[in-house]
Image (spheres, rainbow, N blue to C red):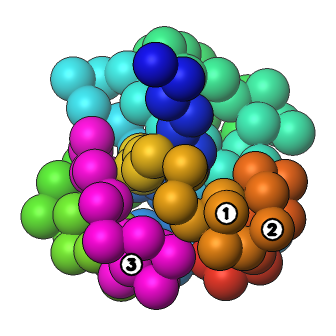
Amino acid sequence: MNVRTLVVLCPDWPVIATAASADEAVAVIAANRVTATSPAARAEGVEVGLRRRDAQRRCPGLHIVDPDPDRDARVFASIASLVDQFTPRVELSSPGSLAFPTLGPSRYFGGDDPLARLVASEID
């Protein structure tokens, strides 16, 4: 059986869920380690796994955010609800990650590529 799946993955979801501006250097830090970064923080050399002190040394203006799984889940639920219009079978793996089988939706929306473009434009 041929099963195709569309996956929406955002590894730095905890930073996006903070609603920080796109040009702000932000890092989520848990247990003294960076767990997620914004593009601006990455541009300054801040990487996942880096110690807090090293991250602050690389980016003195770094805005540090504590992990908040409830916020992450609450904000991601709004993204998942946007995907509901394409299929009733959305599977949430974790905040920042969802998937759904594409067989029916792909037929309806003209193929896998058009479906992926529609989903991406809807959640962008």
**Which comes sooner in the sequence, label 3 or label 2?**
3
> How many residues crowd mark 1 within 10 Å: few (<14), some (14–19), many (20+)?
few
Residue at left 30%, top 23%?
32
Mark 1, residue position? 107
What amino acid type should be assigned to the residue bearing mark 2? Gly
- For image coordinates 30% across by 60% down, the residue present is 89
Measured as percent of width and height from the top left, residue 7 is found at: 54, 43
User: Helix, strand, or loop for circle 2?
Assistant: loop
- Residue 124, image quadrant: bottom right
Check the image and report above or below for 94 versus 53. below
The numbered disc on residue 84 is: 3
Q: Which residues are magenta?
A: 80-95
Indicate left or right for 86 with 46 as reference: left
Residue 91 belongs to the span the image colors magenta: yes
- Disc 3 residue crowd, few under 14, some 14–19, many 20+, Cα 10 Å: few
Q: Circle 3 — which element?
A: loop
Label 1, label 3: how far apart the Cα atoms are: 16 Å
Place residue 77 in its image quadrant: bottom left
Residue 82 in the image, given as x and y percentages of width and height = 46, 83
* Amino acid at circle 3: Asp
Say which quarter of the image contains residue 12. Answer: top right
Side of 93 relative to 100 (left or right): left
Q: Nearer the viewer, residue 100 or 55?
A: 100
Q: Is residue 72 above or below residue 74?
A: above
Q: Which residue carries the number 2 mark?
A: 110
Amino acid type, mark 1: Arg
Mark 2, residues whose alpha carbon is within 10 Å: few (<14), some, or many (≥20)? few
